Image: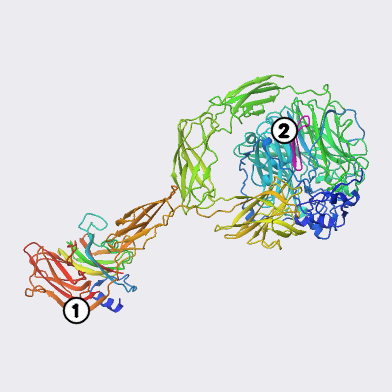
Amino acid sequence: MNTRILRSLLLGFALVALTSSAARAAGPFQFFSVTPCRIVDTRNPNGVTGGPALAGQATRSFPVTGLCGVPSTAQAAVLNVTVVAPTGGGHVRIWPFGATMPLVSTINFDPGEPAIANGAIVPLSSDPSLSISTFLGASSGNTAHLVIDVTGYFQ
Amino acid sequence: MKRALIFGSILLVALGVSFASVLLRRHSNAVAPVSAASKAAGLPTPAERPAVKAEPLGSVASTRVAATQKRGIPRKRRAIASRKPIAAVETEAYRAAGGPRAGGAAPAGVGEDEEKPPRAPATPESLALWTYREGDPITPVLSPELRNIAPIEGSRDEQRVVENERLPYRGESPGRRPVVPDGALQPSFGVNAPTPTGVNFAGIGVNGSAPSDDNGRVGPNNYIQTVNSQFAVYSKTGTLQFGPANINTLFSSLSGPCKTQNNGDPIVQYDALADRWILSQFAVNALPTGLASYQCMAISKTGDPLGAYYLYPFPLSPVLFFDYPHVVTWPDGYYATYHVFDETKPTAQQYQNQGLVVFERDMMLVGLPARLINKSIGTPGAQEFFGGQATDLDGLTPPPPGSQEYLFIPGSPEWDGSSAPMIHSFKLATVWGGSPGVTVTGPTNILTASFTTNLCNFSRTCVPQPPPSGSADKFDPITGEFMSRAAYRNNGGTESIMLVHTVNALVPTANQGATRWYEIRTPATTPTIFQQGTFAPDTDWRVVGSIAMDNGGNVALGYTKSSATVFPEIDVTGRLAGDPAGTMGAEVVMQPGVGAQIATANRWGDYSGMSVDARDGCTFWYTTQYIPVTGSFTWGSRIAAFKFAPANCSAPLQGTLSGTVTDQTGAPVAGAIVKLDNGFSGATNGSGNYSIVLPPGGTNAIASAPQRPGCNNSASTPVTITNGSTTTQDFVLGGNALFVAGPVVIDDTNGNNNGHINHDECVVLDVPLDDLGCNGATGISAVLSTSTPGVTVTQASATYPNVTPGARVVNTPRYKISTSSSLVCGTPISFTLTVSSSAGSQPVLFTVPTCDTPTTVAGAITAGDPTQTARLSRGGLISSCGATATCPLTTGTGTRHYDSYTYTNTAATSKCVTVEVSPNCAEVGGQIFSAAYLGSFNPASLCTNYLGDPGTSPANGGTSQYAFDVPAGATFVVVVHEVNQNVFCSAYTLKVSGLDDTSGGGRPSATITAPSSFCASSTGNTASVPDAGPGATYVWTLSGGSITGGQGTRTLTFSAAASGSVVLGVTVTSSTGCVSTGSATLPITACGAGRAFFTLPPCRVLDTRNPTGAYGGPSLAGGATRTFTIAGQCGVPLTATAIAVNFTVTGSTGGGFTTLFPAGTTLPLASTSNFSAGQTRANNAIPPLNGVGDLSIFCGMGVGQTVDVIIDVAGYFQ
């Protein structure tokens, strides 16, 4: 893939860089679609890809590769990120597991929003068990449920 | 006599290549014409013969070499030979340097009074191979019964001088030569002497070594003689029962220097308290350093000298030369005194100290691992002691309970710098237990009557003989030192110790060797000289004496007498207890002198042996050497018995305690020991019988069976011994069955069949169980396990037949193990066998070696073998690992037939390789030699690629050994060749050990060959393992997919799941049942080429707010799916797999969500957009299409509710 095209692609999506201050380009990669598939739903019983809800000012990490047909070799995933029933307004950041939390946001929401979604292309870590980290940018004590669906990946 | 042909000779020896150059000089001026006899005998011409061969030579006169006396020797100390080895070093060296002329024979005659340069120190690498640490117990090996061992017979044509390192005599300084006459001189004969009993027979004779070191001991039924370097067992009437054989015949069950070296300095002992025989010699200049010293000790298992022996290769030092060992018997240990030298130091600093080693007698009596205590007495360069002897128990009365051992060392100004003639007396208190040690108290100096040890200014060339010997043939008086054991007798509470040494009866510089003897009493309190005398009744020399006391307090003194008119003869004198103090009596000729010693390196002695029959208490047995036929290396020996009249000596009161030791089943226990509180003991024979002869009285007896650790000791049982009768005391030992592993059988015929365990091999094991308890066991089952990496037990359970105590049983079925590629070669496998039986559960631990590959080949040197040019000189040095060997000179002319054997070190590291060569040549004079070469052997250039050699040629039946390092991956060649041209060797064996066989064991491979990943949902995938041969089976397991074919074969066919990983497992079993398992976990990935992104001008594809149509209304209805064909709209091609869109919802009549997904697929659990009633929401999405450009949208709302959606496209992937 031509990097110019990729750049233009990324313009339309919230992109999480590897680091906020020293991003390094990687690629080019090619796109593979998968049948839309739910990876995370924190409304489910507690578990690696289930509950509890995200807590304000806390980081939580999730696997992506190995699930929903995303191979371990995937470099980035095409996600639909949905915030459900936040107890207050705020934002959610998503970045590769193991990297420093960047100054970005993937989705923003107001208080009382029952559910709100956004598409995102998120780079993945090479860790075999955890791919991405999330941060709930809301007041401490607030919570929000998070749902992550995947429709494709780059490698 | 005269001038007959004699065996001439040659010689010699000495350790040290550099010494050869001395010989070279020495020999160069003495050449003899070859005799007609030698030609007639058809022997090889001397030029082709090794120097060590004796051959007929010309006249005596022409064979002698004027042995020069020492010259320019440092005043204070010098080293000369001590009783040291042996190496049969070549004479060829001097020949090559212009020695012998055509047809000439090599004469010899060598004075050893030469300085030798220091040996090279041991390298750190070779020292690292010395694994003995102080306090380590030495585990013995039980020999077969001696009567069943094939004797190693010394090569009689190999002549060697057993060296004797030079002591640091002070008297070599002229200023120290005493001028005081002997203060105890007996200038005339006395009256009494022991009477010959009529037993007087020839002992071991000419065997190629000098000096003879002749000594012997009498036991209840036998006499054993040891000489350099052979031994023989006789009946008490002189009937030969075993031998003469090389002493290392006894040690042939061992490995290492005590087996492969036959260095001499032997001592035989009879331990009357335990009714055992102890035979010993040293092994010196030994591996691993080439400098190491060992004391090789063999102790008979019972009183039968032809029975089995416990063999102990006691390590003494990796670098020091422990010379002149004299082993004696004492209740708390076997003690040995030594002269300790450091040959790596300059000559004047080589002497170190009077060595003292105590061996753990209690353990040796029962054949258990025994320790030694190594002690130095004296300080090099400061207070030096040498020439000492420790007390040796004679008779049936032990020393008082708890008695210390005593050590006596001569001292005088000219000897060791003492202030006056004296005896340095020491007490030695030995403790064993957890921290063994010997406390040395002393010296207490006992002043003696004046004497001087300065004979011939300490030259070996000293004792005169009649013609035809010349001045150069004078022999060594072994002046000064106490040569023979300090004979101890406890005679009714009076403790007497007899000592003897050679002194000068005249005042130097005049010389006449005489025997100075002492009786020392009260050793436990203040050792005191009870009487002393210097026996010099006429002008003849009397030297190399040995002395003992009988049960009546009478004394016999044996010695060699010689002078310019008396051929060396064997005489015995003596004294009755009541004779005037300090006097000996008449002289009894035991063996008249008949010949003179020529050219034998001036060596004589170095000691002789007077012993007393312990049980009859009165019969003295004496042995020493004489010269049956004038010549070089022609010594013979006699063994004879003497006693004083019954009125003067009677046997000690004694009775016998005997009985049988049995186990819980009533079966006899062999090898048990019955110990009495008074120090006596007896071992049981194969019938469980013991018999102890001891003084009458009451004592307590305890029977135990240390070789059967499952047996309990008996209770202490009071016994009463009555004079002249036998007391019977039987013992029944308690205790359960106790299992130990017997010799494990390794059967790898299902593997690579090389006899040892390799990596990747299935091996069958038989693990015999020996019941070393005192009862039997039934219902025996066992489970084998191991924690050694790379080893799996595949048949762990077995049963054993019922066992009786002392017996061995074997498992059924056989155990099986398999090894993997991670097995570490050379690391033993540690097994635990958990044995359950009627005796309970016992863990039995044992180890099995891996990859150990001693290879033994049988060969022969024949006329058809290839030939090399000349051969290497046998320099007497044993090549060792950790040091680079120097190629000895080549020697001889013509060619030698050789065999060569090529090996490769296939390991990843350098290996220490040991080569052992054992000839059994039927040919007269057949000798072989060996050398090793790195890479290749060039028969025309014997030092090219040289790695090492054994230094000597072994005797038939013996073994020579050498070692060298071989780099990783390197090839080396071992050459075995004849020593004498065309004198073949009909049979020899060559053993090469130390290499690891790193080859695999042929276990079937279960290594799976498969693609590194699989396409999601792909079919027709294959994975396979190598062919394991006919009859093999293959069992596969699979997760992350489905097996579609090939189960049971080596190639599996399967489909992959949609995601995750494919996990393959396989178990391969060869036709011999050897099992391997393999597994592989491989990822499932999306396949095909990835898709590239193509931009489009932003374009609205559909808007359900528009009028009803394919891309317009109606609105989406809750719970329904609506499908749109995207391809063909806004430039999206049919081939697009996904589109990049902005997806907007608006006008909802309630809250809900939408899901975009490929048309024709099941609605997934996923969402694209969420909204509340009335909200307008936009979201980015890259929804996949169904391959023909169709997209479905599900409306997640309540039935009856609606929402409008708008899709704007910005690009697509294809």
Q: Is residue B414 left or right of residue B335?
A: right
- Crowding at dot 1, Cα within 10 Å, few <14 / some 14-19 / many 20+, comes out as some
Q: Which is in the foreground here, disc 1 or disc 2?
A: 1
* Disc 1: host chain: B
Q: Residue at label 1? A: B1131
Q: Secondary structure at mark 2?
A: strand
> Is A47 situated above or below A122?
above
The amino acid beneath tag 1 is Gly
Tell me whether circle 1 and circle 2 mark residues in contact (CB < 8 Å). Answer: no
Q: Quadrant of residue B203?
A: top right
Q: Which residues are magenta?
A: B224-242
The one nearer the camera, B561 or B199, is B199
x, y (%) of residue B1185?
20, 70
Q: How many numbered discs sit on the rendered protein? A: 2
Task: Considering the whole magenta stretch, tell me its main secondary structure.
Answer: strand
> Is B820 situated above or below B528?
below
Picture quarter with the N terminus of chain B: top right
> Is B719 situated above or below B120?
above
* Disc 2: host chain: B
Q: Residue at label 2? A: B270
